[in-house]
Amino acid sequence: MASAKNEAPETLDKMIVRAAENTAASIRAARDAIGAVIFGQDEVVDRALITVLAGGHALLVGVPGLAKTKLVDAMGTVLGLEARRIQFTPDLMPSDILGAEVLEESAGGKRGFRFIRGPIFSQLLLADEINRASPRTQSALLQAMQEYHVSVAGTRYDVPRPFHVLATENPIEQEGTYPLPEAQLDRFLMEIDVGYPNREAERKILFDTTGVEETKARAAMTADDLMAAQRLVRRIPVGESVVNAILDLVRAARPGENSEVSKLIAWGPGPRASQALMLAVRARALLDGRLAPSIDDVIALVEPVLKHRMALTFAARADGETIEGVIGRLKAKMA
Protein backbone atom coordinates (compact mmCIF):
# COMPACT_ATOMS: atom_id res chain seq x y z
CA MET A 1 0.00 0.00 0.00
CA ALA A 2 2.88 2.30 0.86
CA SER A 3 4.57 1.69 -2.50
CA ALA A 4 1.37 2.67 -4.34
CA LYS A 5 1.32 5.95 -2.45
CA ASN A 6 4.93 6.58 -3.36
CA GLU A 7 4.35 5.87 -7.04
CA ALA A 8 1.26 8.09 -7.42
CA PRO A 9 3.05 11.48 -7.18
CA GLU A 10 5.76 10.29 -9.59
CA THR A 11 3.16 9.19 -12.11
CA LEU A 12 1.32 12.50 -11.70
CA ASP A 13 4.56 14.44 -12.22
CA LYS A 14 5.27 12.48 -15.41
CA MET A 15 1.76 13.24 -16.67
CA ILE A 16 2.25 16.95 -15.99
CA VAL A 17 5.62 16.93 -17.76
CA ARG A 18 4.19 15.14 -20.80
CA ALA A 19 1.21 17.50 -20.91
CA ALA A 20 3.52 20.49 -20.62
CA GLU A 21 5.74 19.27 -23.46
CA ASN A 22 2.75 18.67 -25.75
CA THR A 23 1.17 21.99 -24.83
CA ALA A 24 4.44 23.87 -25.30
CA ALA A 25 4.77 22.38 -28.80
CA SER A 26 1.24 23.54 -29.69
CA ILE A 27 1.90 27.01 -28.34
CA ARG A 28 5.13 27.33 -30.31
CA ALA A 29 3.24 26.26 -33.44
CA ALA A 30 0.70 29.00 -32.71
CA ARG A 31 3.50 31.54 -32.25
CA ASP A 32 5.02 30.52 -35.60
CA ALA A 33 1.62 30.75 -37.30
CA ILE A 34 1.10 34.30 -36.01
CA GLY A 35 4.67 35.23 -36.93
CA ALA A 36 3.96 34.14 -40.51
CA VAL A 37 1.58 37.10 -40.95
CA ILE A 38 2.90 39.59 -38.36
CA PHE A 39 6.44 40.66 -39.25
CA GLY A 40 9.00 42.29 -36.98
CA GLN A 41 6.91 42.17 -33.82
CA ASP A 42 8.21 39.01 -32.15
CA GLU A 43 8.20 40.47 -28.64
CA VAL A 44 4.69 41.87 -29.10
CA VAL A 45 3.42 38.49 -30.33
CA ASP A 46 5.06 36.70 -27.40
CA ARG A 47 3.59 39.09 -24.84
CA ALA A 48 0.12 38.87 -26.38
CA LEU A 49 0.30 35.06 -26.27
CA ILE A 50 1.59 35.16 -22.68
CA THR A 51 -1.36 37.35 -21.71
CA VAL A 52 -3.88 34.95 -23.22
CA LEU A 53 -2.14 31.89 -21.74
CA ALA A 54 -2.28 33.57 -18.34
CA GLY A 55 -6.04 34.08 -18.82
CA GLY A 56 -5.78 37.87 -18.95
CA HIS A 57 -6.47 40.91 -21.11
CA ALA A 58 -3.96 43.13 -22.90
CA LEU A 59 -3.77 46.81 -23.86
CA LEU A 60 -1.86 47.32 -27.12
CA VAL A 61 -0.41 50.83 -27.38
CA GLY A 62 1.09 52.16 -30.59
CA VAL A 63 0.69 54.63 -33.42
CA PRO A 64 -1.66 53.78 -36.31
CA GLY A 65 -0.58 51.32 -38.99
CA LEU A 66 1.51 48.93 -36.87
CA ALA A 67 -0.78 45.89 -37.40
CA LYS A 68 -2.35 45.95 -33.92
CA THR A 69 -5.76 45.04 -35.34
CA LYS A 70 -4.23 42.46 -37.69
CA LEU A 71 -2.45 40.85 -34.74
CA VAL A 72 -5.72 40.34 -32.89
CA ASP A 73 -7.42 38.97 -36.00
CA ALA A 74 -4.53 36.55 -36.52
CA MET A 75 -4.64 35.42 -32.89
CA GLY A 76 -8.35 34.67 -33.16
CA THR A 77 -7.77 32.49 -36.22
CA VAL A 78 -4.64 30.74 -34.94
CA LEU A 79 -6.07 30.00 -31.48
CA GLY A 80 -9.45 28.89 -32.83
CA LEU A 81 -11.41 31.58 -30.99
CA GLU A 82 -14.60 33.34 -32.01
CA ALA A 83 -13.39 36.92 -32.45
CA ARG A 84 -15.38 40.13 -32.73
CA ARG A 85 -14.41 43.75 -33.07
CA ILE A 86 -15.83 46.93 -31.58
CA GLN A 87 -14.72 50.25 -33.05
CA PHE A 88 -14.86 52.63 -30.11
CA THR A 89 -16.14 56.11 -30.96
CA PRO A 90 -17.30 59.04 -28.80
CA ASP A 91 -20.97 58.24 -29.49
CA LEU A 92 -20.70 54.52 -28.63
CA MET A 93 -23.18 53.50 -25.91
CA PRO A 94 -22.87 50.68 -23.32
CA SER A 95 -25.74 48.84 -25.01
CA ASP A 96 -23.70 48.77 -28.23
CA ILE A 97 -21.23 46.56 -26.34
CA LEU A 98 -23.42 44.54 -23.99
CA GLY A 99 -26.61 44.24 -25.99
CA ALA A 100 -30.14 45.36 -25.18
CA GLU A 101 -33.65 44.14 -24.52
CA VAL A 102 -36.18 44.69 -27.28
CA LEU A 103 -39.95 44.49 -27.04
CA GLU A 104 -41.40 41.83 -29.30
CA GLU A 105 -44.95 40.77 -30.07
CA SER A 106 -45.71 37.14 -30.82
CA ALA A 107 -48.14 35.91 -33.46
CA GLY A 108 -50.72 35.50 -30.70
CA GLY A 109 -50.43 39.15 -29.72
CA LYS A 110 -48.43 38.50 -26.55
CA ARG A 111 -45.70 41.03 -25.84
CA GLY A 112 -42.41 40.38 -24.09
CA PHE A 113 -38.80 41.43 -23.93
CA ARG A 114 -36.02 39.52 -25.64
CA PHE A 115 -32.34 40.11 -24.97
CA ILE A 116 -30.19 40.60 -28.06
CA ARG A 117 -26.58 39.90 -27.20
CA GLY A 118 -23.94 42.44 -28.09
CA PRO A 119 -20.42 41.82 -29.46
CA ILE A 120 -19.01 41.33 -25.95
CA PHE A 121 -20.36 37.77 -26.15
CA SER A 122 -17.31 36.45 -27.98
CA GLN A 123 -14.15 34.62 -26.97
CA LEU A 124 -11.70 37.22 -28.25
CA LEU A 125 -12.92 40.81 -28.25
CA LEU A 126 -10.97 43.52 -30.05
CA ALA A 127 -11.73 46.89 -28.47
CA ASP A 128 -10.29 49.14 -31.14
CA GLU A 129 -9.16 52.62 -29.98
CA ILE A 130 -10.75 52.08 -26.59
CA ASN A 131 -9.77 55.53 -25.33
CA ARG A 132 -12.02 57.25 -27.88
CA ALA A 133 -15.20 56.20 -26.03
CA SER A 134 -16.62 57.93 -22.96
CA PRO A 135 -15.80 56.62 -19.47
CA ARG A 136 -19.38 55.36 -19.13
CA THR A 137 -18.97 53.17 -22.19
CA GLN A 138 -15.47 52.07 -21.21
CA SER A 139 -16.81 50.91 -17.85
CA ALA A 140 -19.27 48.58 -19.62
CA LEU A 141 -16.31 46.24 -20.10
CA LEU A 142 -15.25 46.23 -16.45
CA GLN A 143 -17.62 43.60 -15.10
CA ALA A 144 -17.05 41.19 -17.96
CA MET A 145 -13.25 41.56 -17.82
CA GLN A 146 -13.12 40.68 -14.13
CA GLU A 147 -16.19 38.56 -13.42
CA TYR A 148 -16.89 37.03 -16.87
CA HIS A 149 -20.54 38.01 -16.90
CA VAL A 150 -22.66 41.09 -17.49
CA SER A 151 -25.90 42.27 -15.93
CA VAL A 152 -28.63 43.76 -18.11
CA ALA A 153 -31.97 44.78 -16.59
CA GLY A 154 -31.11 42.82 -13.46
CA THR A 155 -30.43 39.56 -15.32
CA ARG A 156 -27.01 37.91 -15.41
CA TYR A 157 -25.57 36.74 -18.73
CA ASP A 158 -22.30 34.80 -18.80
CA VAL A 159 -19.76 35.55 -21.52
CA PRO A 160 -18.22 32.61 -23.42
CA ARG A 161 -15.08 30.97 -22.11
CA PRO A 162 -12.29 31.55 -22.75
CA PHE A 163 -12.87 35.30 -22.81
CA HIS A 164 -10.15 37.82 -23.56
CA VAL A 165 -10.19 41.52 -24.34
CA LEU A 166 -7.36 42.88 -26.47
CA ALA A 167 -7.76 46.64 -26.60
CA THR A 168 -5.82 49.05 -28.79
CA GLU A 169 -4.92 52.60 -27.85
CA ASN A 170 -3.38 55.37 -29.91
CA PRO A 171 -0.90 57.33 -27.76
CA ILE A 172 -0.66 60.38 -30.03
CA GLU A 173 -4.34 61.08 -30.72
CA GLN A 174 -5.15 63.24 -27.73
CA GLU A 175 -8.01 65.30 -29.15
CA GLY A 176 -11.35 63.59 -28.64
CA THR A 177 -9.99 60.86 -26.36
CA TYR A 178 -10.72 59.94 -22.76
CA PRO A 179 -8.04 58.53 -20.44
CA LEU A 180 -8.85 55.06 -19.17
CA PRO A 181 -9.70 55.12 -15.44
CA GLU A 182 -7.29 53.41 -13.05
CA ALA A 183 -9.87 50.75 -12.18
CA GLN A 184 -10.09 49.69 -15.81
CA LEU A 185 -6.35 49.86 -16.44
CA ASP A 186 -5.84 47.47 -13.54
CA ARG A 187 -8.02 44.89 -15.33
CA PHE A 188 -5.43 44.59 -18.10
CA LEU A 189 -2.77 42.02 -17.27
CA MET A 190 -0.25 43.78 -19.53
CA GLU A 191 0.26 47.00 -21.42
CA ILE A 192 2.13 46.06 -24.59
CA ASP A 193 3.98 48.73 -26.54
CA VAL A 194 3.87 48.17 -30.30
CA GLY A 195 6.87 49.83 -31.96
CA TYR A 196 8.02 50.31 -35.53
CA PRO A 197 9.38 47.24 -37.36
CA ASN A 198 13.01 47.12 -38.42
CA ARG A 199 14.05 47.61 -42.05
CA GLU A 200 14.09 43.92 -42.99
CA ALA A 201 10.68 43.30 -41.41
CA GLU A 202 9.23 46.31 -43.20
CA ARG A 203 10.65 44.97 -46.46
CA LYS A 204 8.75 41.70 -45.88
CA ILE A 205 5.59 43.68 -45.14
CA LEU A 206 5.90 45.53 -48.46
CA PHE A 207 6.13 42.36 -50.52
CA ASP A 208 3.51 40.39 -48.55
CA THR A 209 0.80 43.04 -48.45
CA THR A 210 1.10 44.69 -51.86
CA GLY A 211 1.07 41.59 -54.08
CA VAL A 212 -1.79 39.69 -55.63
CA GLU A 213 -2.20 37.38 -52.64
CA GLU A 214 -1.58 38.14 -48.97
CA THR A 215 -0.48 35.49 -46.47
CA LYS A 216 -3.40 34.37 -44.28
CA ALA A 217 -3.23 33.07 -40.72
CA ARG A 218 -3.97 29.38 -40.20
CA ALA A 219 -5.43 27.65 -37.16
CA ALA A 220 -2.92 25.92 -34.89
CA MET A 221 -5.03 25.38 -31.75
CA THR A 222 -8.64 25.16 -30.64
CA ALA A 223 -10.42 26.92 -27.81
CA ASP A 224 -10.33 23.69 -25.80
CA ASP A 225 -6.56 23.43 -26.38
CA LEU A 226 -6.14 26.97 -25.12
CA MET A 227 -8.17 26.36 -21.96
CA ALA A 228 -6.15 23.22 -21.26
CA ALA A 229 -2.97 25.29 -21.61
CA GLN A 230 -4.37 27.93 -19.25
CA ARG A 231 -5.09 25.26 -16.64
CA LEU A 232 -1.58 23.91 -17.06
CA VAL A 233 -0.07 27.37 -16.54
CA ARG A 234 -1.63 27.49 -13.08
CA ARG A 235 -0.06 24.13 -12.20
CA ILE A 236 3.50 25.10 -13.10
CA PRO A 237 5.59 25.27 -9.91
CA VAL A 238 7.23 28.56 -8.94
CA GLY A 239 10.42 28.60 -6.87
CA GLU A 240 10.71 30.60 -3.67
CA SER A 241 13.35 32.89 -5.21
CA VAL A 242 10.99 33.80 -8.06
CA VAL A 243 8.11 34.46 -5.65
CA ASN A 244 10.35 36.72 -3.57
CA ALA A 245 11.49 38.56 -6.71
CA ILE A 246 7.86 39.22 -7.66
CA LEU A 247 7.00 40.49 -4.18
CA ASP A 248 10.15 42.64 -3.96
CA LEU A 249 9.54 44.33 -7.31
CA VAL A 250 5.80 44.95 -6.89
CA ARG A 251 6.12 46.22 -3.33
CA ALA A 252 9.06 48.45 -4.24
CA ALA A 253 6.86 50.11 -6.91
CA ARG A 254 4.52 51.51 -4.24
CA PRO A 255 4.82 54.83 -2.41
CA GLY A 256 5.85 54.81 1.23
CA GLU A 257 8.46 52.05 0.95
CA ASN A 258 11.18 54.37 2.31
CA SER A 259 13.43 54.25 -0.74
CA GLU A 260 14.61 56.80 -3.29
CA VAL A 261 12.47 55.24 -5.99
CA SER A 262 9.26 55.08 -3.92
CA LYS A 263 9.43 58.82 -3.29
CA LEU A 264 8.86 59.35 -7.02
CA ILE A 265 5.63 57.30 -7.08
CA ALA A 266 2.20 58.84 -6.45
CA TRP A 267 0.35 55.53 -6.51
CA GLY A 268 1.49 52.03 -7.32
CA PRO A 269 0.38 48.49 -8.13
CA GLY A 270 -1.86 46.48 -5.83
CA PRO A 271 -1.99 42.74 -5.18
CA ARG A 272 -3.61 42.15 -8.59
CA ALA A 273 -0.27 43.14 -10.14
CA SER A 274 1.50 40.44 -8.13
CA GLN A 275 -1.08 37.90 -9.30
CA ALA A 276 -0.66 39.03 -12.92
CA LEU A 277 3.13 38.79 -12.76
CA MET A 278 2.96 35.34 -11.15
CA LEU A 279 0.77 34.01 -13.96
CA ALA A 280 2.73 35.81 -16.67
CA VAL A 281 6.11 34.35 -15.70
CA ARG A 282 4.59 30.86 -15.68
CA ALA A 283 3.11 31.43 -19.13
CA ARG A 284 6.44 32.75 -20.45
CA ALA A 285 8.22 29.66 -19.18
CA LEU A 286 5.68 27.40 -20.91
CA LEU A 287 5.97 29.40 -24.14
CA ASP A 288 9.73 28.76 -24.07
CA GLY A 289 9.25 25.06 -23.31
CA ARG A 290 10.42 25.30 -19.68
CA LEU A 291 8.65 23.68 -16.72
CA ALA A 292 9.43 26.42 -14.20
CA PRO A 293 9.89 30.20 -14.43
CA SER A 294 13.09 31.99 -13.48
CA ILE A 295 14.00 35.43 -12.15
CA ASP A 296 14.86 36.38 -15.75
CA ASP A 297 11.16 35.91 -16.60
CA VAL A 298 10.23 38.29 -13.80
CA ILE A 299 12.70 40.95 -15.00
CA ALA A 300 11.50 40.55 -18.61
CA LEU A 301 7.80 41.02 -17.78
CA VAL A 302 7.77 43.41 -14.84
CA GLU A 303 7.57 46.53 -17.03
CA PRO A 304 4.53 45.58 -19.16
CA VAL A 305 2.75 44.26 -16.06
CA LEU A 306 3.43 47.26 -13.79
CA LYS A 307 3.72 50.42 -15.87
CA HIS A 308 -0.02 50.99 -16.40
CA ARG A 309 -0.60 50.42 -12.68
CA MET A 310 1.68 53.26 -11.55
CA ALA A 311 1.76 57.05 -11.61
CA LEU A 312 4.58 59.46 -10.80
CA THR A 313 4.34 62.44 -8.47
CA PHE A 314 4.12 65.91 -9.98
CA ALA A 315 7.63 66.69 -8.78
CA ALA A 316 9.01 63.54 -10.42
CA ARG A 317 7.36 64.39 -13.75
CA ALA A 318 8.72 67.95 -13.51
CA ASP A 319 12.21 66.50 -13.06
CA GLY A 320 11.84 64.46 -16.26
CA GLU A 321 11.33 61.08 -14.63
CA THR A 322 9.37 58.40 -16.49
CA ILE A 323 7.57 55.23 -15.41
CA GLU A 324 9.89 53.16 -17.60
CA GLY A 325 12.93 54.78 -15.98
CA VAL A 326 11.64 54.09 -12.47
CA ILE A 327 10.91 50.45 -13.30
CA GLY A 328 14.35 50.21 -14.88
CA ARG A 329 15.91 51.24 -11.57
CA LEU A 330 13.89 48.59 -9.75
CA LYS A 331 15.03 45.94 -12.23
CA ALA A 332 18.65 47.03 -11.89
CA LYS A 333 18.52 46.26 -8.18
CA MET A 334 17.42 42.68 -8.98
CA ALA A 335 20.25 42.03 -11.47
Image (cartoon, rainbow, N blue to C red):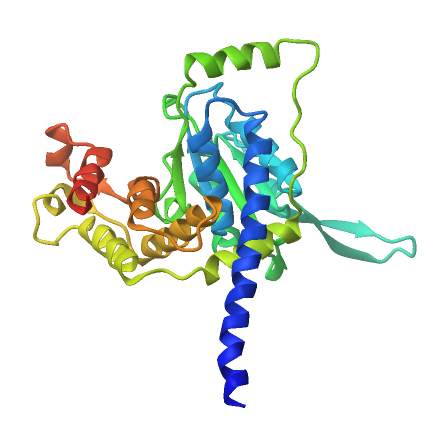
> In the current view of this chain or complex, which residue is farthest to the bottom?
1
Q: Residue at x 49, y 81 (%)?
A: 6
Report if residue 148 is visible in the image.
no
Looking at the picture, how far across and down is residue 86, in whole percent? 58, 34
Q: State the image coordinates of residue 299 (x, y, percent, origin top left).
A: 28, 44
Q: Quadrant of residue 63?
A: top left
For residue 39, above or below residue 245 = above
Where residue 257 appears, x then y in whole percent? 12, 54
For the N terminus, the quadrant is: bottom right
Residue 112 shows up from this direction: yes
Residue at figure coordinates x 39%, y 42% from the top left: 190
Query: In terms of depth relative to the viewer, which is nearer, 164 or 115?
Result: 164
**Nearest the camera: 233 or 310?**
233
On the rendered structure, is 146 left or right of 306? right
Q: Is residue 198 above or below residue 283?
A: above
Residue found 74% across the figure and 53% down from its top: 114
Pinpoint residue 202: horizontal percent, then vertical percent.
48, 13
**Quadrant of the image for the C terminus?**
top left
Q: How many marks?
A: 0
Residue furthest to the right in view is: 108
Position of residue 293 relative to residue 82, above or below, is: below
Q: Residue at x 42, y 49 (%)?
A: 285
